[in-house]
Image: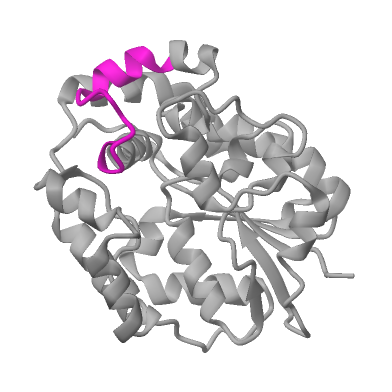
Amino acid sequence: MARLPNTLIVGAAKSGTTSLYDYLQQHPDVFMSPVKEPRYFAYAENPPAMVGPGDEASNRESGAVYTMDAYRALFEGAADEAVVGEASPVYLYDADAPRLIAEHCPDATLIVVLRNPVERAYSHFLHLVRSGREPLRDFEAALDAEPRRIEKGWEWSWHYRRMGGYAAQLARYRERFADAQIQVSFFEDLKADTVAFAQRVYRALGIDDTFAPSVGAPRRSTGYPRWQWFQAFLHTPDHPLRRAARRVLPEWVRDRVLTSAKNANLKKPPMSRAARRRLVDASREDVHRLEALLDRDLSHWLEPA
């Protein structure tokens, strides 16, 4: 029977989890699920209604699985690697995930990467704008729409502000796992020195921390597309030019070229001061709770631009 993971990157979304998945996947002592975001422990009992724009397609493309048999199958390729893992950033936010992970993977190491909740919310908004799913172009209007969207059953990606309530989310895990099992890191540290960040994670997992991962272009930059037609091409896997490239270029070359092209086609306007003030005010209480929980000064998260 396939091994279940002993390491899970549980969040937060838009905080570098895709990059960390990549750095773990490169390590010779690690087997990562070929599906980056199985989302099983969030979807097994209460999957989202998937009624928001592109919800069904996005989750289908992510490879999300809904049964334990399908989840186990993801790890059939694992051999004698010390670390067997996956990365589903919805797990930190989802209320059921801590209990289900504790039931099936009670000894797992849980990796949490936190990002300033104000910046995280705006990044997620721009991500959905980039993918063509967000029908609004004004961030404050999207924040106004958030409660109605949640009530209607739009999936978790649309919960821009609510996903930043890290203190309550971490508390749910601390109720079920020992503190030593929960490794909390910060997106700002990943950005400051990516290789050192990855090596600290390796060290925490008890694997060779002298291994230096290959660090390329940002995996998922966000922003408004400069040219909509080019954006449509970049996000059309069956375009004739994309099919031709698959015949002549190695996958890693295609991936790097496509990532660079996607990033070059994006422009990231600054968040408005009004939106920033609004999110800072909404985040203040939770940030102070998180500071006490982690014994770390996070006052810079509450500073105006």
Q: Is residue 56 something one can see in this rendering?
A: yes
**Residue 142 lies within the magenta run:** yes
- The residue lying furthest to the front in this view is 240
- The residue lying furthest to the left in this view is 226
Residue drawn where x is 30% and y is 54% of the image: 236
Q: Is residue 238 above or below residue 124?
A: below
Query: Where's the N terminus, which quadrant?
Result: bottom right
Q: Is 270 left, or right, of 177 in this rendering?
A: left
Residue drawn where x is 31% and y is 20% of the image: 142
Q: Is residue 176 something one can see in this rendering?
A: no
Query: Where's the C terminus, which quadrant?
Result: top left
Q: Is residue 203 above or below residue 117?
A: below
Q: Is 277 left, or right, of 188 in this rendering?
A: left
Quarter holding residue 188: bottom left
Q: Position of residue 180 (x, y in %)?
A: 74, 58
Q: Is residue 50 above or below residue 181?
A: above
Q: Position of residue 232 (x, y in %)?
A: 22, 49
Q: Position of residue 80 (x, y in %)?
A: 78, 85
The boundaries of the magenta stretch are 129-146
Q: Is residue 167 above or below residue 283?
A: below
Residue drawn where x is 47% and y is 43% of the image: 58
Compare residues 155 and 211 and report the one nearer the observer: 155
**Residue 139 lies within the magenta run:** yes
Compare residues 170 and 285 and report the one nearer the observer: 170
Quarter holding residue 174: top right
Residue drawn where x is 45% and y is 16% of the image: 149
